[in-house]
């Protein structure tokens, strides 16, 4: 009776290939062999610095021989199904993004207004806690509260003028 193994990828029981002397863990299907090679390569890249360097140089050489814009153009011309699927997926992403933003107020991070909203005068700046809510704001912005003060107020004693 032929010996059988359980494939590590698909889990099926398969007969051992008699040409493989020891250590067979995968069946002969294309998907399982691809999984076996991928696992071997990930492990090799992780543990062998010389292999990793050779692989890096080979990729650099390939990239130089095939400029990205030409490669993408050629790929798209040969795979029209990919192009259409990508366009449809992009439409879905845009629709999803637009639906999620409708309930939020979007603040333009570099907005400036020609009309001054603040009258000229002296003001003290007080740091405020970050606003919580669904507003989208610049992440490194400091939120302050402007409070009008009198010219002769004690705060102006610290003025350097």
Image: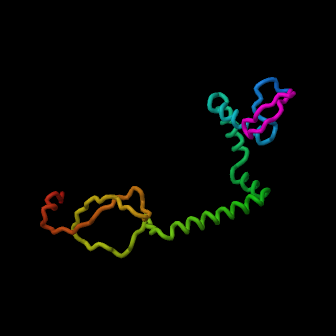
Where residue 65 sits in the image (x, y, percent)? 73, 44
Q: Which of 89/158 is in front?
A: 89
Question: With 19 as the anchor, is 75 left or right in this view?
Answer: left
Q: In the image as oriented, which residue stretches furthest toward the bottom? A: 115
Q: Quadrant of the C terminus?
A: bottom left
Question: With 105 as the anchor, is 78 left or right in this view?
Answer: right
* Residue 158 falls within the magenta-colored stretch: no
Indicate the quadrant where residue 61 lies.
Answer: top right
User: Residue at position x 27%, y 74% from top?
Assistant: 119
Residue bounds of the magenta highlight: 1-18
Question: With 1 as the anchor, is 153 left or right in this view?
Answer: left
User: Residue at position x 26%, y 66% from top?
Assistant: 146
Q: Which of 85/72 is in front?
A: 85
Q: Which of 31/50 is in front?
A: 31
* Residue 13 falls within the magenta-colored stretch: yes
Question: With 72 as the anchor, is 102 left or right in this view?
Answer: left
Q: Which of 97/109 is in front?
A: 97
Where residue 91 sits in the image (x, y, percent)? 64, 66
**Number of marks in the rendered image:** 0
Where residue 11 sits in the image (x, y, percent)? 74, 39
Q: In the image as oriented, which residue stretches furthest toward the top? A: 21
Where 152 sits versus 54, above or below?
below
* Colouring of the image: rainbow
Name the main secondary structure of what is drawn in magenta: loop
User: Residue at position x 18%, y 59% from top?
Assistant: 159
Where 81 sits versus 55, above or below?
below
Where 12 sits versus 74, above or below?
above
Q: Quadrant of the N terminus?
A: top right
């Amino acid at each position: 009776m032929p010996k059988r193994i359980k494939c590590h990828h698909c889990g099926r029981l398969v007969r051992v290939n008699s040409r493989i002397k020891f250590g067979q863990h995968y069946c002969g299907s294309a998907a399982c062999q691809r999984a076996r090679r991928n696992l071997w390569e990930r492990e090799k890249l992780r543990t062998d610095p010389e292999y990793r360097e050779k692989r890096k140089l080979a990729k650099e050489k390939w990239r130089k021989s095939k400029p990205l814009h030409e490669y993408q153009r050629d790929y798209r011309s040969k795979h029209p199904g990919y192009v259409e699927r990508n366009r449809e997926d992009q439409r879905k992403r845009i629709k999803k993004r637009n639906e999620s933003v409708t309930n939020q107020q979007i603040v333009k991070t570099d907005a400036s207004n020609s009309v001054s909203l603040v009258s000229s005068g002296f003001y003290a700046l007080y740091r405020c806690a970050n606003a919580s809510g669904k507003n989208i704001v610049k992440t490194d912005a400091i939120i302050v509260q402007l409070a009008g003060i009198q010219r002769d107020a004690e705060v102006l004693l610290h003025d350097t003028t």
